[in-house]
Amino acid sequence: MKVVIVGGVAGGATAAARLRRLDEQAEIIIIERSHYVSYANCGLPYFIGGTITDRKKLTLQTPESFRSRFNIDVRVCQEVTSIDRFNHLVEIRNLESDETYTESYDKLILSPGAHPVLPPVPGIDSHLVFTLRTVEDTFAIDSFIAENNAAHATIVGGGFIGLEMAENLIDRGLQVTVIQRPDHLMPTLDPDMAALLHNEFRAHGVTLKLSANVVGFEELTRSDGKASIVTHIQDDSFAPESDLIIVATGVAPESTLAKEAGLELGIKGSIKVDDHLLTTDKDIYAIGDAIETTQIVTDSPAHIALAGPANKQGRIVADNICGIDRTYDGALGSSVMKAFDLTVATTGLTSKAATTAGLDFDSVALSPASHATYYPGSHTMTMKVLFERPSGRIIGAQIIGGEGSDKRIDVLAVAIKAGMTAYDLTELDLAYAPPYSSAKDPVNMAGYIMENVLEGTVKQAHWDEALQLADNSEQVIILDTRTRSEYEQSHIPNALHIPLDDLRTHLDELPREKRILVHCASGLRSYLACRTLMQNGFECANIAGGYNFYQAIHLDHNATSEDVGDCGIKVD
């Protein structure tokens, strides 16, 4: 059997190695158009920032190592230019010599990846405009900064690559501006959660320009003769002058080869595959960033360009080629990103995606500590978990915090994959010791809160809803149940203040004809207040996330996170 693989990196390289483990006699050829067949794609920004200093560490496998260990023929700087499906041939061009030749195949695996999307604006072809997708891109940016003593960079795009580059360029000593067309960074976050990310980036000196549409770039020549570049934004005088531009506005599937071969395409021009990752040709498989996959929560077509799914798909295709029946169910889009001192982790659907899918859902927001607060060094994480009504099925989660955030998102990803509900989360038996967690893990706590909402033990409101109701109705008031010192430090205008511990002796001061929206710092004390109020005949709702969430969203300031209890008060 002869297998030709178009593209290496995550999916293609994984497929090749798995094929060899299953079939020692197979002839395996990888055709890779870059100089590097298998490299740490997600580590590229950290080389530019200086965290990774050895170029060799970016390379996971080389043509020589593939040959010596796996007896796999890897041809770099070569590109498959066409597929002859009838004769089972691919045409290949050597990018260094410009020579072309053909290669036969029994099975073909397409793993061409994706390419950066460049906005069609004037100046996009400037030599001062860069993208970051390959090792070659990385070295080009690194060399440019060093050789030109670059001091300021503008990044267009606030997704994974854009934000990782922003952090690493700040670490390298550059001034950084991030321009984002939507109104918030990171499309995998809801706007309220993204506010915490905005505050963190601004606190580290990054200038953010949100809801900004780039309409062009213009090269200038400074008085010292050095070139610079200006970014023009539609309907705005804000035009930062920079030494370089990095465009990180997303990627598109690299599906031209498949399209020209007559294979069926799907969403966003991605290559359509079945659950065995087989294309519309029985001898051609496709994997990685180029393919259409399934969003597990909604069971709908999706394009999810992440390394984890690509690696899994590579293994599955190799198994199928070797006669082992494997299927791919789809992906959740689980992700994690370092953002200065924060970890940003997501899985499943955002509120926008859930709304688009037509789901009846709600969400809870909580801010538990990473481990027991009596053990030093705990850090608060802000969690938002989405659940379907009335079943309580978990459909998405977002966590921003420090240590332990990645652990909890992984647990929630497993819960979503397994079709678990809020009630199931309350029963999860998770590891506990004071340096690592609390007896009631944050995942358990999210389950308890959702359970209370689903069963009507407490009603809840979200901040935008609460503020709008309080502003537009005389029949709604906001009650602040924090301590006096917390209230005096900062509070919502016109909010009624009664500390939780004084509430029972001040019930007569509350208007029974009005709806009371209650908050504390985190949502815990206000929940207790709601239980007291409900059992005394008041109509009330707990405001999700508490005042700490409010100040992140509306006051552009993240609350203190170190050694803070679940109630939102710093532990002495």
Image: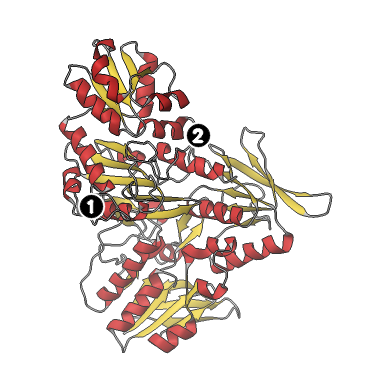
Which of 18 and 498 lies nearest the eye of the viewer? 498
Relative side of 295 to 214, left or right: left
Tell me if I can see residue 382 in this picture.
Answer: yes
| Image coords of residue 501 (percent x, y) | 28, 25
| Image coords of residue 213 (percent x, y) | 57, 39
Q: Residues within 10 Å of mark 1 (few under 14, many from 20)?
A: many
Q: Quadrant of the N terminus?
A: bottom left
* Mark 1 lies on residue: 415
Residue type indicated by callout 2? Asp
Camera-side mark, 2 or 1: 2
Marks 2/1 in contact by CB < 8 Å: the verdict is no
| Image coords of residue 257 (percent x, y) | 45, 66
Q: Quadrant of the C terminus?
A: top left
Which of 478 and 69 lies nearest the eye of the viewer? 478
Q: Residue at x 56, y 42 (%)?
A: 202
Eyeballing the image, is 556 above or below 4? Answer: above
Q: Please, what secondary structure does the residue beneath circle 2 have?
A: loop
| Image coords of residue 219 (percent x, y) | 73, 49
Residue 556 is labelled as 2
Lower position in the chain sequence, tag 2 or tag 1: 1
Eyeballing the image, is 486 above or below 20? Answer: above
- Using the rendered view, name the quadrant where residue 106 is placed: bottom left
Residue type indicated by callout 1? Ala
Q: Residue at x 58, y 60 (%)?
A: 49
- Using the rendered view, name the quadrant where residue 473 is placed: top left
Q: Mark 2 to mark 1: distance in Å?
A: 32 Å
Which of 238 and 101 lies nearest the eye of the viewer? 238
